[in-house]
Image: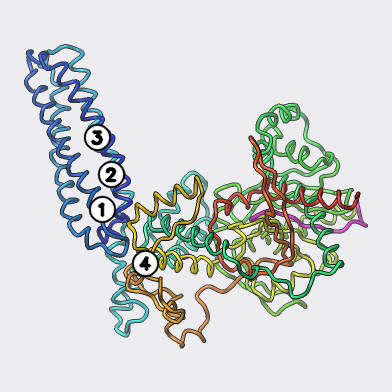
């Protein structure tokens, strides 16, 4: 919980950073004390008395600061997240520390003046030592000011307005309504400024400004109803991971249940799709260009690419965008194994809502392949985060359907290039009997899926392979429609495949619930969590207020949870107020595209420098991905090299079975 209403700071965040400061100040105090002792007899010089006084007072001042900080650390570690009673003296100690900044600043100014005084004629060594001490003081002061600016929350005092004048309060008066509107606008502007600061290195145009406002509104809506700080989230994630592992170790029904026993036809279909996916994943990975090639070949990539860097670009293919030294195109050739003449169009152009892609002829599978790149730049991240919903209306297919706004705009860009620029016409003029296949990984997988929907009427036989696409992509009607021509491939506990606003809202609710009601100090939770994540072991059994409550009671928030909610979360409103059950949800449910192949680790054998993992693939459905799973592999399972490795392992296993 926050110390003050206007600071994005919690007791454990404060104590962890303060411990670091204490260690640094203690080393500095010991160093200054040593220097004072060594040079004690060398201040008998003009101006030496001032320098002697500076060091002596600085030693006393630093000792006072260290004592104040130590008291702050001790008090901040008392109590639990939702029980701040034992920490009630913390504000007084913090004000004491803040008051010590005044003499610290004054003494730093005095030291700078005295050291630079021309009337001081002491030994050069003494002058240099004290000059270093003064510089260190100013560096600490500057970093302190920067830290204050970082943790300062411009929304702090205004957040309490939600508590007393939230959406469940009577806002009939125009003054209250205007105030609420002002608070929301202020919050959106604050988030927009933060995003602009993070993206300060990229050229910003009208599309960027629209995206910044949209993303800021999304963040404002998501974070406006909680009082969580980073350490609360970290504690919640480690508790959820341990709780999840305990549940998985208990005997239970399998998470994924097929409606019927898998017939040989279903098995053959799965094996065929896995083999095709393993082949086309090479194209999806190649779309990343040289970063992926260097990542997967760290010792040999540069040498292999250097031979092609000075080569002429092929005249047969149309290349747009920047590709210095031909590294991107050279990497694509190495990964796919295609020839120069097999490429119809390659675009390295990258802006917000405009992502790179290439079109090539795959003679092995007799296909025209459109490969779309995944997230690799700030512009791509902004496209990902433009997660508003918009309607996608298709003639003779559906009346309407909801889609991810940013990814849909990226698909529209590629659609215009393929159709208006005649790229696909050129490809099918060369190979009229080939079929159209669209592939992509991550953001590229989501874009490929929506692009496939747009092109389906013109190319009825097209296929799309979406590798690790984002979960919040298509409405239910569109997701069902795409089962005829899109296959999504998900590995393990991939986070991105489970990312959607309803899932994020559910994760926030779970974090608030488990963190607020754990009866252990937060530092114990985090220390135990770090040990568990690094070294493993049995999940810790932290006692909580949830223990012993019946199932009906679990649908109501506890007092501890309400203390972390600035206003009532939509997830709680729907539980308590039946009128909300008939109202449209704040975040529409969006799903993964097409049929879903879920690849899981069946067994793992660790060796000295590597591990041998055996995978199993099965048909799955969208309900399996309706909740975010916490795991160290939630990020690595999304990486393109892991997806390719899993698919190659399954494909090789199937091939060996056929040969037997």
Residue 28 versus residue 266 in the image, above or below: above
Residue 368, disc: none
Badge 1 is on which residue? Answer: 76
Badge 4 is on which residue? Answer: 517
- Which of the two discs, 4 and 3, sits closer to the camera? 4
Relative to 474, 153 lies left or right: left
Badge 3 is on which residue? Answer: 25
In this view, the residue in front, 423 or 633, is: 633
Residue 185 shows in this picture: no
Relative to 430, 639 lies left or right: left
Q: Is residue 436 magenta?
A: yes
- Element under label 3? helix
Between the C-alphas of marks 4 and 3, the distance is 36 Å
Across and down, in percent, residue 455 comes to 77, 65
> Which region of the structure is painted magenta?
431-443
Quadrant location of residue 570?
A: bottom left
- Element under label 4? loop
């Amino acid at each position: 919980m926050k110390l003050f209403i206007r600071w994005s700071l919690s007791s454990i965040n404060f104590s962890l950073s303060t411990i670091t400061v204490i260690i640094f100040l203690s080393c500095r105090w010991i160093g200054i004390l040593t220097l004072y002792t060594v040079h004690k007899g060398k201040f008998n010089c003009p101006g030496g008395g001032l320098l002697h006084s500076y060091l002596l007072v600085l030693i006393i001042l630093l000792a006072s600061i260290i004592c104040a900080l130590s008291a702050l650390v001790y008090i901040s570690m008392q109590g639990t997240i939702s029980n701040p009673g034992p920490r009630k003296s913390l504000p007084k100690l913090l004000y004491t520390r803040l008051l010590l900044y005044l003499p610290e600043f004054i003494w730093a100014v005095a030291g700078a003046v005295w050291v630079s005084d021309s009337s001081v004629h002491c030994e050069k060594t003494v002058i240099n030592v004290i000059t270093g001490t003064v510089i260190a003081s100013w560096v600490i002061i500057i970093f302190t000011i920067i830290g204050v600016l970082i943790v300062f929350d411009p929304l702090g005092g205004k957040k309490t307005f939600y508590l007393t004048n939230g959406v469940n309060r009577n806002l009939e008066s125009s003054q209250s309504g205007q105030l609420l509107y002002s608070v929301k606008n202020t919050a959106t502007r604050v988030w927009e400024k933060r995003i602009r600061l993070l993206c300060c290195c990229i050229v910003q145009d009208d599309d960027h400004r629209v995206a910044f406002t949209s993303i800021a509104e999304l963040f404002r809506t998501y974070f406006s109803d909680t009082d969580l700080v980073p350490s609360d989230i970290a504690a919640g994630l480690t508790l959820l991971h341990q709780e999840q592992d305990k549940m998985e170790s208990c005997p239970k029904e399998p998470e994924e249940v097929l409606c019927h026993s898998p017939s040989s036809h279903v098995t053959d279909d799965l094996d065929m799709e896995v083999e095709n996916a393993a082949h086309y994943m090479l194209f999806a990975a190649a779309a990343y260009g040289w970063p992926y090639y260097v990542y997967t070949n760290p010792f040999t990539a540069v040498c292999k690419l250097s031979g092609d860097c000075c080569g002429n670009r092929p005249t047969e293919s149309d290349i747009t965008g920047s590709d210095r030294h031909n590294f991107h195109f050279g990497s694509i050739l190495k990964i796919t194994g295609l020839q120069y003449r097999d490429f119809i169009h390659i675009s390295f152009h990258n802006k917000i809502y405009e992502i790179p892609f290439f079109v090539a002829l795959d003679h092995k599978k007799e296909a025209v392949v459109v490969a779309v790149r995944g997230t690799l730049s700030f512009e791509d991240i902004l496209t990902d985060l433009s997660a508003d919903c918009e309607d996608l209306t298709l003639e003779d297919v559906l009346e309407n359907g909801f889609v991810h706004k940013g990814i849909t705009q990226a698909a529209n860009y590629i659609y215009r290039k393929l159709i208006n620029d005649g790229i696909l016409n050129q490809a099918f003029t060369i190979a009229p009997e080939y079929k159209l296949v669209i592939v992509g990984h991550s953001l590229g997988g989501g874009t490929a899926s929506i692009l496939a929907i747009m092109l389906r009427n013109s190319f009825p036989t097209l296929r799309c392979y979406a590798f690790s696409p984002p979960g919040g992509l298509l409405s239910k009607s569109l997701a069902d429609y795409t089962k005829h021509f899109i296959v999504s491939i998900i590995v393990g506990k991939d986070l991105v495949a489970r990312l959607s606003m309803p899932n994020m809202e559910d994760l926030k609710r779970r974090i608030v619930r488990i963190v607020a009601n754990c009866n252990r100090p937060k530092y114990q939770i985090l220390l135990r969590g770090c040990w568990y994540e690094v070294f493993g072991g049995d999940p810790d059994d932290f006692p909580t207020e949830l223990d012993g409550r019946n199932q009906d009671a679990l649908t109501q928030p506890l007092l501890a949870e309400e203390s972390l909610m600035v206003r009532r979360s939509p997830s709680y409103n729907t539980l308590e107020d039946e009128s909300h059950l008939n109202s449209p949800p704040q975040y529409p449910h969006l799903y993964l595209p097409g049929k879903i192949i879920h690849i899981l680790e069946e067994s793992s054998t660790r060796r000295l420098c590597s591990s041998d993992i055996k995978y199993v693939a099965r048909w799955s459905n969208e309900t399996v991905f309706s909740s975010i799973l916490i795991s160290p592999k939630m990020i690595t399972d999304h990486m393109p090299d892991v997806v390719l490795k899993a698919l190659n392992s399954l494909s090789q296993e199937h091939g060996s079975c056929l040969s037997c």
